[in-house]
Image (cartoon, coloured by chain):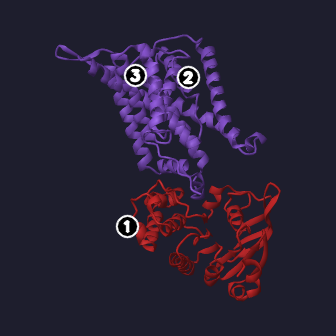
Chain colours: A purple, B red
Amino acid sequence: MTPFLTAFFSGTAQGAIYALVSLGLVLVWRSAGVVNFAQMGQAMFTTYIASQLIQNNYSYWSAFLIALISGAALGALVDLGLMRPLTSRKNSQLLNSQSMRTTIPVIASLGILGVLKALAGIFWAGEERGFPSPVAPNAIKIGDTSLAITGFDLFVIGTVFLTLVLTTIFFTKTGMGLAMRASALNPEVTRLSGIKVGSVRTLGWAISGIASSLAGLLVTPRTNLSPNTLDLLLIIGFTAAVVGGLSSLAGSVLGGFILGYVISFVNVYSAPENVFIAILAFLLLALFLRPQGILGSKEVRSV
Amino acid sequence: MLAITNLVTQFASIKALDSISFQAKPGLITTVIGANGAGKSTLLRTISGLERPSSGSITWFDEELTHKSVEAIVRSGISQVPEGHAVISQLSVAENIELGGLFRKRIARGDLTIATKEVYELFPILFERRNEPAGSLSGGERQMLAISRALVSRPKLLLLDEPSLGLAPLIAAQIISIINELCRSTGLTVLLVEQNANTALAVADHGILLALGKVVADLPAKEMAADSSLRAAYLGY
Protein backbone atom coordinates (compact mmCIF):
# COMPACT_ATOMS: atom_id res chain seq x y z
CA MET A 1 0.00 0.00 0.00
CA THR A 2 1.43 3.35 -0.92
CA PRO A 3 1.93 5.97 1.80
CA PHE A 4 -0.39 8.24 -0.14
CA LEU A 5 -3.35 5.89 0.13
CA THR A 6 -2.54 5.19 3.77
CA ALA A 7 -2.66 8.91 4.49
CA PHE A 8 -5.81 9.34 2.44
CA PHE A 9 -7.83 6.62 4.13
CA SER A 10 -6.73 7.49 7.64
CA GLY A 11 -7.37 11.17 6.88
CA THR A 12 -10.91 10.38 5.76
CA ALA A 13 -11.68 8.40 8.91
CA GLN A 14 -10.18 11.04 11.22
CA GLY A 15 -11.72 13.87 9.25
CA ALA A 16 -15.15 12.28 9.63
CA ILE A 17 -14.81 12.55 13.42
CA TYR A 18 -13.50 16.14 13.27
CA ALA A 19 -16.45 16.97 11.01
CA LEU A 20 -18.85 15.74 13.72
CA VAL A 21 -17.15 17.82 16.42
CA SER A 22 -17.10 20.86 14.19
CA LEU A 23 -20.75 20.36 13.25
CA GLY A 24 -21.70 20.23 16.92
CA LEU A 25 -19.83 23.46 17.65
CA VAL A 26 -21.37 25.31 14.70
CA LEU A 27 -24.89 24.14 15.59
CA VAL A 28 -24.66 25.76 19.01
CA TRP A 29 -22.81 28.80 17.69
CA ARG A 30 -25.49 29.43 15.08
CA SER A 31 -28.54 28.75 17.19
CA ALA A 32 -27.35 30.26 20.48
CA GLY A 33 -24.34 32.44 19.63
CA VAL A 34 -22.19 30.53 22.14
CA VAL A 35 -18.81 28.87 21.60
CA ASN A 36 -19.40 25.79 23.71
CA PHE A 37 -16.10 24.80 25.35
CA ALA A 38 -17.93 22.12 27.34
CA GLN A 39 -18.82 20.20 24.20
CA MET A 40 -16.13 17.53 24.39
CA GLY A 41 -16.62 17.38 28.17
CA GLN A 42 -20.21 16.38 27.43
CA ALA A 43 -18.93 13.77 24.95
CA MET A 44 -16.41 12.46 27.50
CA PHE A 45 -19.14 12.10 30.09
CA THR A 46 -21.57 10.25 27.82
CA THR A 47 -18.78 7.94 26.60
CA TYR A 48 -18.05 7.06 30.24
CA ILE A 49 -21.76 6.29 30.64
CA ALA A 50 -21.57 3.94 27.64
CA SER A 51 -18.40 2.36 28.99
CA GLN A 52 -20.05 1.78 32.36
CA LEU A 53 -23.05 0.16 30.71
CA ILE A 54 -20.83 -2.17 28.69
CA GLN A 55 -18.99 -3.12 31.89
CA ASN A 56 -22.39 -3.95 33.38
CA ASN A 57 -22.97 -6.41 30.51
CA TYR A 58 -25.17 -4.27 28.33
CA SER A 59 -24.63 -4.83 24.61
CA TYR A 60 -22.47 -2.36 22.66
CA TRP A 61 -25.44 -1.13 20.66
CA SER A 62 -27.73 -0.44 23.60
CA ALA A 63 -24.86 1.44 25.31
CA PHE A 64 -24.27 3.31 22.03
CA LEU A 65 -27.93 4.34 21.84
CA ILE A 66 -28.14 5.35 25.50
CA ALA A 67 -24.97 7.45 25.13
CA LEU A 68 -26.54 9.35 22.21
CA ILE A 69 -29.76 9.92 24.15
CA SER A 70 -27.80 11.13 27.19
CA GLY A 71 -25.85 13.43 24.83
CA ALA A 72 -29.11 15.02 23.70
CA ALA A 73 -30.38 15.28 27.27
CA LEU A 74 -27.13 16.78 28.55
CA GLY A 75 -27.10 19.37 25.75
CA ALA A 76 -30.70 20.38 26.45
CA LEU A 77 -29.98 20.48 30.17
CA VAL A 78 -27.04 22.85 29.70
CA ASP A 79 -29.30 25.23 27.79
CA LEU A 80 -32.37 25.00 30.03
CA GLY A 81 -30.54 24.84 33.36
CA LEU A 82 -27.77 27.33 32.74
CA MET A 83 -27.66 29.25 29.46
CA ARG A 84 -31.30 30.34 29.45
CA PRO A 85 -31.38 31.67 33.03
CA LEU A 86 -27.98 33.32 32.51
CA THR A 87 -29.03 35.25 29.44
CA SER A 88 -32.57 36.10 30.49
CA ARG A 89 -32.92 39.84 30.58
CA LYS A 90 -34.40 39.99 34.06
CA ASN A 91 -31.36 38.30 35.49
CA SER A 92 -28.77 40.94 36.04
CA GLN A 93 -27.58 44.45 35.47
CA LEU A 94 -24.38 43.02 33.99
CA LEU A 95 -26.33 41.83 30.97
CA ASN A 96 -27.04 45.36 29.89
CA SER A 97 -23.74 45.38 28.07
CA GLN A 98 -23.61 43.41 24.84
CA SER A 99 -20.06 42.19 25.44
CA MET A 100 -20.98 40.72 28.82
CA ARG A 101 -24.04 39.08 27.33
CA THR A 102 -21.86 37.25 24.82
CA THR A 103 -18.98 36.50 27.22
CA ILE A 104 -20.92 35.11 30.18
CA PRO A 105 -22.24 31.97 28.37
CA VAL A 106 -18.73 31.18 27.08
CA ILE A 107 -17.24 31.43 30.59
CA ALA A 108 -20.17 29.34 31.86
CA SER A 109 -19.36 26.64 29.28
CA LEU A 110 -15.80 26.49 30.64
CA GLY A 111 -17.35 26.04 34.08
CA ILE A 112 -19.46 23.13 32.82
CA LEU A 113 -16.34 21.53 31.36
CA GLY A 114 -14.70 21.71 34.79
CA VAL A 115 -17.76 20.27 36.52
CA LEU A 116 -18.04 17.37 34.05
CA LYS A 117 -14.35 16.50 34.47
CA ALA A 118 -14.74 16.61 38.24
CA LEU A 119 -17.83 14.38 38.05
CA ALA A 120 -15.94 11.88 35.87
CA GLY A 121 -13.26 11.92 38.56
CA ILE A 122 -15.82 11.23 41.27
CA PHE A 123 -17.80 8.52 39.45
CA TRP A 124 -15.03 6.74 37.56
CA ALA A 125 -11.95 7.84 39.54
CA GLY A 126 -10.72 9.54 36.37
CA GLU A 127 -9.15 6.26 35.28
CA GLU A 128 -7.99 5.82 31.72
CA ARG A 129 -9.75 2.89 30.17
CA GLY A 130 -10.19 1.36 26.76
CA PHE A 131 -13.43 1.65 24.85
CA PRO A 132 -14.57 -1.17 22.58
CA SER A 133 -15.32 -0.94 18.89
CA PRO A 134 -18.13 -2.96 17.33
CA VAL A 135 -15.91 -4.15 14.45
CA ALA A 136 -12.42 -5.60 14.52
CA PRO A 137 -9.67 -3.01 14.01
CA ASN A 138 -7.90 -5.21 11.45
CA ALA A 139 -6.88 -4.07 8.00
CA ILE A 140 -9.24 -5.15 5.29
CA LYS A 141 -7.74 -7.73 2.94
CA ILE A 142 -8.46 -8.33 -0.69
CA GLY A 143 -6.81 -11.64 -1.45
CA ASP A 144 -3.34 -11.33 0.05
CA THR A 145 -2.91 -7.56 -0.11
CA SER A 146 -4.12 -5.76 2.96
CA LEU A 147 -5.55 -2.33 2.36
CA ALA A 148 -4.58 0.69 4.44
CA ILE A 149 -8.11 0.89 5.76
CA THR A 150 -9.50 -1.04 8.68
CA GLY A 151 -12.98 -2.31 9.29
CA PHE A 152 -13.25 0.21 12.08
CA ASP A 153 -12.35 3.07 9.71
CA LEU A 154 -15.16 1.98 7.43
CA PHE A 155 -17.54 1.85 10.39
CA VAL A 156 -16.57 5.41 11.38
CA ILE A 157 -16.88 6.76 7.84
CA GLY A 158 -20.21 4.99 7.31
CA THR A 159 -21.70 6.20 10.60
CA VAL A 160 -20.64 9.80 10.00
CA PHE A 161 -21.89 9.69 6.42
CA LEU A 162 -25.28 8.43 7.60
CA THR A 163 -25.38 11.15 10.27
CA LEU A 164 -24.62 13.86 7.73
CA VAL A 165 -27.32 12.58 5.36
CA LEU A 166 -29.88 12.52 8.19
CA THR A 167 -28.82 16.01 9.33
CA THR A 168 -29.16 17.36 5.79
CA ILE A 169 -32.62 15.84 5.40
CA PHE A 170 -33.64 17.26 8.77
CA PHE A 171 -32.51 20.77 7.92
CA THR A 172 -33.77 20.96 4.35
CA LYS A 173 -36.92 18.83 4.34
CA THR A 174 -38.61 19.23 7.72
CA GLY A 175 -40.53 22.10 9.27
CA MET A 176 -38.46 21.88 12.44
CA GLY A 177 -35.27 22.14 10.37
CA LEU A 178 -36.66 25.23 8.63
CA ALA A 179 -37.54 26.73 12.01
CA MET A 180 -33.98 26.11 13.19
CA ARG A 181 -32.42 27.76 10.14
CA ALA A 182 -34.81 30.70 10.36
CA SER A 183 -34.19 31.21 14.11
CA ALA A 184 -30.45 31.33 13.51
CA LEU A 185 -30.75 33.78 10.60
CA ASN A 186 -33.36 36.16 11.95
CA PRO A 187 -34.81 35.48 15.41
CA GLU A 188 -37.20 38.45 15.31
CA VAL A 189 -38.94 37.56 12.05
CA THR A 190 -39.05 33.94 13.24
CA ARG A 191 -40.75 34.90 16.50
CA LEU A 192 -43.18 37.09 14.56
CA SER A 193 -44.03 33.93 12.58
CA GLY A 194 -45.24 32.32 15.81
CA ILE A 195 -42.25 30.05 16.37
CA LYS A 196 -40.91 29.50 19.89
CA VAL A 197 -37.32 30.49 19.24
CA GLY A 198 -36.26 29.50 22.77
CA SER A 199 -37.39 25.90 22.30
CA VAL A 200 -35.76 25.78 18.89
CA ARG A 201 -32.49 26.86 20.49
CA THR A 202 -32.74 24.10 23.10
CA LEU A 203 -33.21 21.63 20.26
CA GLY A 204 -30.00 22.98 18.70
CA TRP A 205 -28.13 22.25 21.92
CA ALA A 206 -29.61 18.74 22.01
CA ILE A 207 -28.64 17.90 18.41
CA SER A 208 -25.16 19.27 19.03
CA GLY A 209 -25.03 17.02 22.12
CA ILE A 210 -25.84 13.98 19.96
CA ALA A 211 -23.18 14.86 17.37
CA SER A 212 -20.44 15.31 19.96
CA SER A 213 -21.51 12.24 21.91
CA LEU A 214 -21.22 10.25 18.67
CA ALA A 215 -17.75 11.72 18.09
CA GLY A 216 -16.74 10.52 21.57
CA LEU A 217 -17.96 6.98 20.86
CA LEU A 218 -16.12 6.88 17.54
CA VAL A 219 -12.78 8.31 18.63
CA THR A 220 -12.20 6.57 21.99
CA PRO A 221 -11.62 3.03 20.63
CA ARG A 222 -8.38 4.49 19.22
CA THR A 223 -7.39 6.99 21.91
CA ASN A 224 -8.74 5.34 25.09
CA LEU A 225 -11.03 7.22 27.44
CA SER A 226 -9.99 9.52 30.25
CA PRO A 227 -11.35 12.86 31.47
CA ASN A 228 -8.81 14.68 29.29
CA THR A 229 -8.47 12.61 26.10
CA LEU A 230 -11.08 14.54 24.17
CA ASP A 231 -9.60 18.00 24.81
CA LEU A 232 -7.44 17.82 21.71
CA LEU A 233 -10.50 16.94 19.65
CA LEU A 234 -12.16 20.21 20.69
CA ILE A 235 -9.16 22.22 19.48
CA ILE A 236 -9.08 20.45 16.12
CA GLY A 237 -12.86 20.62 15.78
CA PHE A 238 -12.85 24.32 16.58
CA THR A 239 -10.12 24.94 14.00
CA ALA A 240 -12.18 23.01 11.47
CA ALA A 241 -15.24 25.11 12.28
CA VAL A 242 -13.32 28.37 11.82
CA VAL A 243 -11.69 27.16 8.60
CA GLY A 244 -15.08 26.11 7.22
CA GLY A 245 -16.75 29.38 8.17
CA LEU A 246 -18.38 29.41 11.61
CA SER A 247 -21.77 30.21 10.18
CA SER A 248 -22.02 27.36 7.68
CA LEU A 249 -22.97 23.79 8.59
CA ALA A 250 -21.69 22.42 5.28
CA GLY A 251 -18.49 24.44 5.73
CA SER A 252 -17.92 23.00 9.18
CA VAL A 253 -18.13 19.46 7.80
CA LEU A 254 -15.80 20.32 4.93
CA GLY A 255 -13.40 21.95 7.40
CA GLY A 256 -13.39 18.75 9.45
CA PHE A 257 -12.38 16.60 6.50
CA ILE A 258 -9.72 19.06 5.36
CA LEU A 259 -8.19 19.07 8.87
CA GLY A 260 -8.30 15.26 8.83
CA TYR A 261 -6.26 15.18 5.61
CA VAL A 262 -3.81 17.86 6.79
CA ILE A 263 -3.10 15.96 10.01
CA SER A 264 -2.90 12.58 8.36
CA PHE A 265 -0.61 13.67 5.50
CA VAL A 266 1.73 15.48 7.90
CA ASN A 267 1.81 12.32 10.02
CA VAL A 268 2.75 10.12 7.08
CA TYR A 269 5.06 12.38 5.08
CA SER A 270 6.59 14.40 7.91
CA ALA A 271 6.59 13.50 11.59
CA PRO A 272 3.83 13.27 14.22
CA GLU A 273 5.47 16.04 16.27
CA ASN A 274 4.86 18.48 13.42
CA VAL A 275 1.09 17.98 13.46
CA PHE A 276 0.39 20.86 15.83
CA ILE A 277 2.54 23.29 13.86
CA ALA A 278 0.71 22.19 10.72
CA ILE A 279 -2.69 22.79 12.30
CA LEU A 280 -1.66 26.26 13.44
CA ALA A 281 -0.08 27.11 10.07
CA PHE A 282 -3.16 25.90 8.26
CA LEU A 283 -5.47 27.93 10.52
CA LEU A 284 -3.44 31.10 10.01
CA LEU A 285 -3.29 30.54 6.27
CA ALA A 286 -7.03 30.02 6.09
CA LEU A 287 -7.67 33.13 8.18
CA PHE A 288 -5.44 35.24 5.96
CA LEU A 289 -6.86 33.98 2.68
CA ARG A 290 -10.51 33.56 3.59
CA PRO A 291 -11.31 35.09 6.97
CA GLN A 292 -15.00 34.37 6.52
CA GLY A 293 -14.25 30.65 6.07
CA ILE A 294 -14.44 28.41 3.04
CA LEU A 295 -18.22 28.43 2.84
CA GLY A 296 -18.95 31.27 5.26
CA SER A 297 -20.57 34.36 3.91
CA LYS A 298 -19.22 37.85 4.48
CA GLU A 299 -21.21 39.82 6.95
CA VAL A 300 -23.10 42.48 5.15
CA ARG A 301 -24.04 45.49 7.20
CA SER A 302 -26.92 47.49 6.00
CA VAL A 303 -27.06 51.13 6.95
CA MET B 1 -61.96 45.04 18.36
CA LEU B 2 -58.45 46.07 19.29
CA ALA B 3 -58.48 48.33 22.33
CA ILE B 4 -55.41 50.19 23.52
CA THR B 5 -55.82 51.81 26.94
CA ASN B 6 -53.38 54.24 28.59
CA LEU B 7 -50.44 52.45 27.01
CA VAL B 8 -46.96 53.57 28.10
CA THR B 9 -43.77 52.15 26.60
CA GLN B 10 -40.51 53.68 27.67
CA PHE B 11 -36.86 53.27 26.85
CA ALA B 12 -34.83 54.28 29.92
CA SER B 13 -36.49 57.55 30.92
CA ILE B 14 -37.90 58.45 27.50
CA LYS B 15 -41.56 57.70 26.98
CA ALA B 16 -41.89 56.56 23.37
CA LEU B 17 -45.60 55.99 23.97
CA ASP B 18 -47.09 58.35 26.51
CA SER B 19 -50.46 57.08 27.75
CA ILE B 20 -52.01 56.20 24.41
CA SER B 21 -55.65 55.13 24.08
CA PHE B 22 -57.61 54.29 20.92
CA GLN B 23 -59.60 51.50 19.33
CA ALA B 24 -59.43 49.76 15.97
CA LYS B 25 -62.78 48.40 14.78
CA PRO B 26 -63.00 44.88 13.29
CA GLY B 27 -63.10 44.56 9.53
CA LEU B 28 -61.86 48.10 8.99
CA ILE B 29 -58.54 49.77 8.21
CA THR B 30 -57.27 52.03 10.96
CA THR B 31 -54.19 53.99 10.05
CA VAL B 32 -51.68 55.44 12.49
CA ILE B 33 -49.85 58.40 11.00
CA GLY B 34 -47.33 60.84 12.34
CA ALA B 35 -43.87 62.24 11.74
CA ASN B 36 -40.63 60.35 12.29
CA GLY B 37 -40.15 59.55 15.98
CA ALA B 38 -43.83 59.94 16.84
CA GLY B 39 -43.86 56.39 18.26
CA LYS B 40 -45.64 54.60 15.42
CA SER B 41 -43.26 51.67 15.17
CA THR B 42 -42.99 51.37 18.95
CA LEU B 43 -46.77 51.13 19.07
CA LEU B 44 -46.83 48.16 16.67
CA ARG B 45 -43.86 46.50 18.37
CA THR B 46 -45.64 46.82 21.72
CA ILE B 47 -48.86 45.32 20.35
CA SER B 48 -46.98 42.34 18.91
CA GLY B 49 -45.04 41.83 22.15
CA LEU B 50 -41.56 42.77 20.90
CA GLU B 51 -41.47 45.67 23.36
CA ARG B 52 -42.88 45.46 26.89
CA PRO B 53 -45.21 48.25 28.01
CA SER B 54 -44.55 49.72 31.45
CA SER B 55 -48.25 50.33 32.02
CA GLY B 56 -51.61 50.29 30.27
CA SER B 57 -53.33 47.46 28.45
CA ILE B 58 -53.86 45.97 25.00
CA THR B 59 -56.91 43.78 24.39
CA TRP B 60 -58.20 41.99 21.29
CA PHE B 61 -61.93 41.39 21.84
CA ASP B 62 -61.92 39.71 25.28
CA GLU B 63 -58.32 38.60 25.10
CA GLU B 64 -55.73 40.40 27.20
CA LEU B 65 -52.50 40.61 25.16
CA THR B 66 -50.46 42.90 27.38
CA HIS B 67 -48.04 40.39 28.91
CA LYS B 68 -48.20 37.58 26.41
CA SER B 69 -45.13 36.37 24.51
CA VAL B 70 -44.61 37.30 20.86
CA GLU B 71 -45.32 33.71 19.77
CA ALA B 72 -48.54 33.52 21.80
CA ILE B 73 -49.78 36.80 20.30
CA VAL B 74 -49.16 35.53 16.76
CA ARG B 75 -50.95 32.31 17.67
CA SER B 76 -54.00 34.26 18.79
CA GLY B 77 -54.37 35.66 15.29
CA ILE B 78 -52.36 38.87 15.32
CA SER B 79 -49.64 39.08 12.74
CA GLN B 80 -47.12 41.84 12.18
CA VAL B 81 -45.35 42.76 8.97
CA PRO B 82 -42.31 44.54 10.38
CA GLU B 83 -40.66 47.63 8.98
CA GLY B 84 -38.13 47.36 6.18
CA HIS B 85 -39.64 44.51 4.12
CA ALA B 86 -38.51 42.02 6.73
CA VAL B 87 -37.96 38.67 5.07
CA ILE B 88 -35.15 36.17 5.68
CA SER B 89 -33.00 36.81 2.64
CA GLN B 90 -30.96 33.58 2.79
CA LEU B 91 -34.12 31.43 2.68
CA SER B 92 -36.06 30.85 -0.52
CA VAL B 93 -39.33 32.64 -1.24
CA ALA B 94 -41.27 29.42 -0.64
CA GLU B 95 -39.46 28.82 2.66
CA ASN B 96 -40.29 32.32 3.89
CA ILE B 97 -43.96 31.66 3.19
CA GLU B 98 -43.79 28.20 4.76
CA LEU B 99 -42.26 29.75 7.87
CA GLY B 100 -45.33 31.93 8.41
CA GLY B 101 -47.63 28.91 8.60
CA LEU B 102 -45.27 26.50 10.33
CA PHE B 103 -46.92 26.78 13.73
CA ARG B 104 -50.24 25.68 12.21
CA LYS B 105 -48.78 22.71 10.35
CA ARG B 106 -50.00 20.09 12.81
CA ILE B 107 -53.39 21.63 13.52
CA ALA B 108 -54.44 22.78 10.06
CA ARG B 109 -52.34 21.20 7.35
CA GLY B 110 -55.14 21.28 4.76
CA ASP B 111 -55.92 24.92 5.30
CA LEU B 112 -52.24 25.78 5.14
CA THR B 113 -52.07 24.41 1.59
CA ILE B 114 -55.09 26.55 0.66
CA ALA B 115 -53.64 29.66 2.36
CA THR B 116 -50.34 29.18 0.49
CA LYS B 117 -52.19 28.83 -2.80
CA GLU B 118 -54.13 32.00 -2.04
CA VAL B 119 -51.06 34.15 -1.42
CA TYR B 120 -49.50 32.86 -4.64
CA GLU B 121 -52.71 33.88 -6.46
CA LEU B 122 -52.56 37.29 -4.77
CA PHE B 123 -48.90 37.75 -5.76
CA PRO B 124 -48.21 35.60 -8.87
CA ILE B 125 -44.65 36.96 -9.12
CA LEU B 126 -43.82 35.19 -5.85
CA PHE B 127 -44.99 31.89 -7.33
CA GLU B 128 -42.74 32.41 -10.33
CA ARG B 129 -39.77 33.11 -8.10
CA ARG B 130 -40.63 30.65 -5.31
CA ASN B 131 -37.32 28.75 -5.48
CA GLU B 132 -35.08 31.82 -5.51
CA PRO B 133 -33.56 33.26 -2.34
CA ALA B 134 -35.68 36.06 -0.88
CA GLY B 135 -32.60 38.30 -0.97
CA SER B 136 -32.75 38.40 -4.76
CA LEU B 137 -36.20 40.02 -4.82
CA SER B 138 -36.84 43.69 -5.48
CA GLY B 139 -38.07 45.92 -2.65
CA GLY B 140 -41.70 45.65 -3.72
CA GLU B 141 -41.51 41.88 -4.08
CA ARG B 142 -39.90 41.59 -0.65
CA GLN B 143 -42.79 43.56 0.82
CA MET B 144 -45.24 41.24 -0.94
CA LEU B 145 -43.36 38.30 0.54
CA ALA B 146 -43.40 39.80 4.05
CA ILE B 147 -47.17 40.29 3.73
CA SER B 148 -47.61 36.74 2.41
CA ARG B 149 -45.65 35.32 5.33
CA ALA B 150 -48.08 37.08 7.67
CA LEU B 151 -51.18 36.06 5.67
CA VAL B 152 -50.55 32.29 5.67
CA SER B 153 -50.96 32.36 9.44
CA ARG B 154 -54.59 33.42 8.74
CA PRO B 155 -54.46 36.49 10.97
CA LYS B 156 -57.59 38.25 12.17
CA LEU B 157 -55.63 41.43 12.79
CA LEU B 158 -52.81 42.48 10.48
CA LEU B 159 -50.27 45.02 11.73
CA LEU B 160 -48.39 46.74 8.92
CA ASP B 161 -45.34 48.85 9.67
CA GLU B 162 -44.69 51.37 6.88
CA PRO B 163 -45.33 49.00 3.95
CA SER B 164 -44.66 51.75 1.41
CA LEU B 165 -41.31 52.83 2.87
CA GLY B 166 -38.55 52.89 0.27
CA LEU B 167 -40.77 51.73 -2.58
CA ALA B 168 -41.42 53.44 -5.90
CA PRO B 169 -44.77 55.32 -5.68
CA LEU B 170 -46.47 53.05 -8.22
CA ILE B 171 -45.46 49.87 -6.34
CA ALA B 172 -46.39 51.42 -2.99
CA ALA B 173 -49.85 52.32 -4.32
CA GLN B 174 -50.28 48.79 -5.68
CA ILE B 175 -49.42 47.22 -2.32
CA ILE B 176 -51.72 49.55 -0.38
CA SER B 177 -54.58 48.82 -2.77
CA ILE B 178 -54.06 45.05 -2.41
CA ILE B 179 -54.27 45.45 1.37
CA ASN B 180 -57.43 47.47 0.93
CA GLU B 181 -59.07 44.79 -1.26
CA LEU B 182 -58.02 42.09 1.18
CA CYS B 183 -59.65 43.89 4.08
CA ARG B 184 -62.87 44.51 2.15
CA SER B 185 -63.16 40.98 0.79
CA THR B 186 -62.14 38.95 3.86
CA GLY B 187 -63.13 41.07 6.84
CA LEU B 188 -59.52 41.27 7.99
CA THR B 189 -58.84 44.01 10.54
CA VAL B 190 -55.89 46.17 9.56
CA LEU B 191 -53.76 48.52 11.61
CA LEU B 192 -51.65 50.41 9.09
CA VAL B 193 -48.74 52.54 10.25
CA GLU B 194 -47.64 55.00 7.61
CA GLN B 195 -45.50 58.07 7.25
CA ASN B 196 -47.13 58.74 3.93
CA ALA B 197 -50.36 60.20 5.32
CA ASN B 198 -52.08 60.86 2.00
CA THR B 199 -51.77 57.30 0.72
CA ALA B 200 -52.85 55.84 4.05
CA LEU B 201 -55.83 58.13 4.66
CA ALA B 202 -57.09 57.50 1.13
CA VAL B 203 -57.79 53.82 1.90
CA ALA B 204 -58.34 53.90 5.66
CA ASP B 205 -61.64 54.13 7.52
CA HIS B 206 -60.21 55.75 10.58
CA GLY B 207 -57.12 57.81 11.34
CA ILE B 208 -55.02 58.17 14.48
CA LEU B 209 -52.47 60.96 14.48
CA LEU B 210 -49.50 60.52 16.79
CA ALA B 211 -47.03 63.22 17.83
CA LEU B 212 -44.22 62.66 20.33
CA GLY B 213 -45.86 59.54 21.74
CA LYS B 214 -49.31 61.03 22.25
CA VAL B 215 -52.56 60.75 20.30
CA VAL B 216 -53.31 64.25 19.01
CA ALA B 217 -56.22 63.38 16.75
CA ASP B 218 -58.60 60.41 16.50
CA LEU B 219 -60.95 61.00 13.55
CA PRO B 220 -62.65 59.28 10.63
CA ALA B 221 -60.07 59.14 7.84
CA LYS B 222 -62.04 61.45 5.53
CA GLU B 223 -62.25 64.18 8.16
CA MET B 224 -58.59 63.86 9.01
CA ALA B 225 -57.60 64.10 5.34
CA ALA B 226 -59.70 67.22 5.00
CA ASP B 227 -58.30 68.97 8.06
CA SER B 228 -55.53 71.11 6.68
CA SER B 229 -54.63 72.67 10.03
CA LEU B 230 -53.81 69.23 11.51
CA ARG B 231 -51.64 68.43 8.51
CA ALA B 232 -49.82 71.71 8.72
CA ALA B 233 -49.21 71.40 12.45
CA TYR B 234 -48.11 67.78 12.66
CA LEU B 235 -47.13 66.51 9.23
CA GLY B 236 -45.58 69.66 7.83
CA TYR B 237 -47.36 70.07 4.50
Q: Which residue is located at x 68 percent, y 62 percent? A: B45
Q: Nearer the viewer, residue A3 or B120?
A: A3
Q: Which subunit holds the residue at mark 2? A: A
B211 relative position to A52: left or right: right
Residue B47, above or below B233: above
- Where's the C terminus of chain A, which quadrant? bottom right
- Quadrant of the image containing the N terminus of chain A: top left
**Residue at coordinates 66% horizontally, 79% vertically from top-left?**
B197
**Residue A45 numbered tag:** 2
Q: Around disc 1, counting alpha carbons within 10 Å, would you say few (fewer than 14), some (14 to 19), or many (20 or more)?
A: few
The residue that appears at 49% across and 11% down in the rendered structure is: A129
Find the residue positioned furthest to the front. A288
Identify the residue position indicated by label 3 in the image: A263
Name the residue beneath numbered marker 1.
B128
Residue B59 coordinates in the image, percent (x, y): 73, 67
Amino acid beneath label 1? Glu
